[in-house]
Image (cartoon, grey):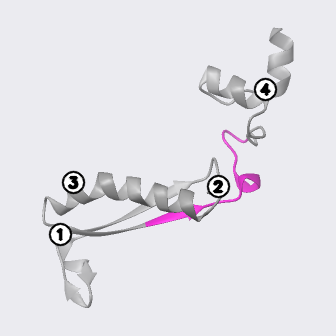
Amino acid sequence: MPAHDLYLGGARRSKFTTITIYHVARRFENELNQQRFLKKVDSILNPRLGGKGMDWEYFIQESPRELWKINGIVPPPSGSEMEKLWFKENKPVVEGDVKANL
């Protein structure tokens, strides 16, 4: 987007960015976890963007795990043996393929 198309408070602003964070693998269990995550994001963004004289905003989008797929596969339940296998392989694994390779 051209810098002349960015507005902040109704005024043109060339040093501005919007960041979207997709948080889909897990849900925040409580407000304490949410605040901890926000604090970590701030600790990363504030020095990098603020140090450049930029303004920014960010938005964290949480999605129900049931509406999430990787390569067309619904991820296994949290903590399951299949999830551990996905982690070990560092990729989605089709359950039938696991049985065929045993």
**How packed is label 4: few (under 14 Cα within 10 Å), some, or many (20 or more)?**
few
> How far apart are the alpha carbons under marks 3 and 2?
27 Å
Which badge, 1 or 4, comes first in the chain's sequence?
A: 1
Q: What amino acid does circle 3 point to? A: Arg
Instruction: Residue under label 3, please give it.
Output: 48
> How far apart are the alpha carbons under marks 1 and 2?
32 Å
> How far apart are the alpha carbons under marks 3 and 4?
39 Å
Q: Position of residue 99 (x, y in %)?
A: 86, 16
Horizontal relation, residue 42 to residue 77: left or right = left
Q: On screen, 15 above or below 89?
A: below
Q: Position of residue 84 (x, y in %)?
A: 70, 26
What residue do we see at 34% from left, 59% from top? 42
Which badge, 3 or 2, comes first in the chain's sequence?
A: 2
Q: Judging from the image, what secondary structure is the residue with disc 2 in?
A: loop
Nearer-the-camera pick, 55 or 67: 55
Horizontal relation, residue 83 to residue 10: left or right = right
What residue do we see at 58% from left, 65% from top? 31
Cβ atoms at labels 1 and 3 below 8 Å apart: no
Instruction: Residue under label 4, please give it.
Output: 81
Q: On screen, 34 above or below 57?
A: above
> How far apart are the alpha carbons under marks 1 and 3?
13 Å
Instruction: Residue under label 2, please give it.
Output: 27
Which badge, 3 or 4, comes first in the chain's sequence?
A: 3
Start-end of magenta stretch: 59-72
Q: What amino acid does circle 4 point to? A: Glu
Which badge, 1 or 3, comes first in the chain's sequence?
A: 1
> How far apart are the alpha carbons under marks 2 and 4?
20 Å
Which badge, 1 or 2, comes first in the chain's sequence?
A: 1
What residue do we see at 31% from left, 51% from top? 44
Nearer-the-camera pick, 2 or 91: 91
